Amino acid sequence: MNRFLVACGVVAMLAFPVFASAQDTHAPSKVADFHLSTALKVGTTTLKPGDYKFQCIFVDGGHFMVVKSEDGKEVARVPCTPEDLGRRNEVSEFRSITRPDGTRDLSAVRFKGETISHRVAT
């Protein structure tokens, strides 16, 4: 009986980190509000200047950056890859790449309080 309890305890201790990491991977990121003063291309969608909400979600086995307009309608969704930064972000920010023709493409989003940068395929 004593060996059985020890075996159950070992199995529970080994299983707990797996459950915890699975929950963390599937949890959506925080939401960040950004005001765009110029157009920004997110995947194949060009966002006009205005206010938008950005969030990374996990759907169908993949991470996606979702952008919603002020009225809550989804206007863009692109695959993204979470990358560990090793430090906590102090502010929410997005990064973009400026093309030779002057257009800007979203390249990454960082959410305040997270230790992850969400890289967007450009």
Image: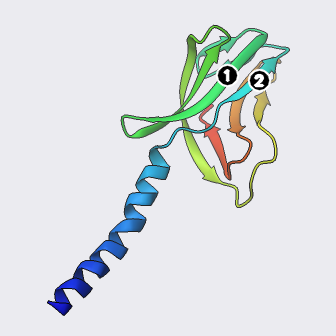
How far from the left and from the top, in percent, is residue 82?
58, 46
Give the residue type that dot 2 points to. Phe
Q: Are marks 2 and 1 in contact (CB under 8 Å)?
A: yes
Q: Which mark is residue 53?
A: 1
Q: From this view, report whether residue 35 is shown above or below residue 12.
A: above
Secondary-structure class at tag 1:
strand
The span from disc 2 to disc 1 (Cα, nearest Å) is 6 Å
Q: Residue at x 78, y 25 (%)?
A: 99
**Which mark is drawn over residue 34?**
2
Q: Of residues 24 and 97, which is closer to you in this image?
A: 24
In the rendered image, residue 14, in percent from the top left (x then y), is placed at 35, 74
Mark 2 or mark 1: name the one nearer the start of the chain. Answer: 2
Q: Badge 2: few (under 14), some or many (20 or more) residues near its Cα, within 10 Å?
A: some
Most foreground residue, 83 or 51: 51
On the image, the x and y values in percent for residue 77 come to: 54, 23
Closer-to-camera residue (12/99): 12
Seen in the image, is 10 located left or right of residue 57?
A: left
SS at circle 2: strand
Which residue sits furthest left? 1
Give the residue at x 61% y 21%: 67
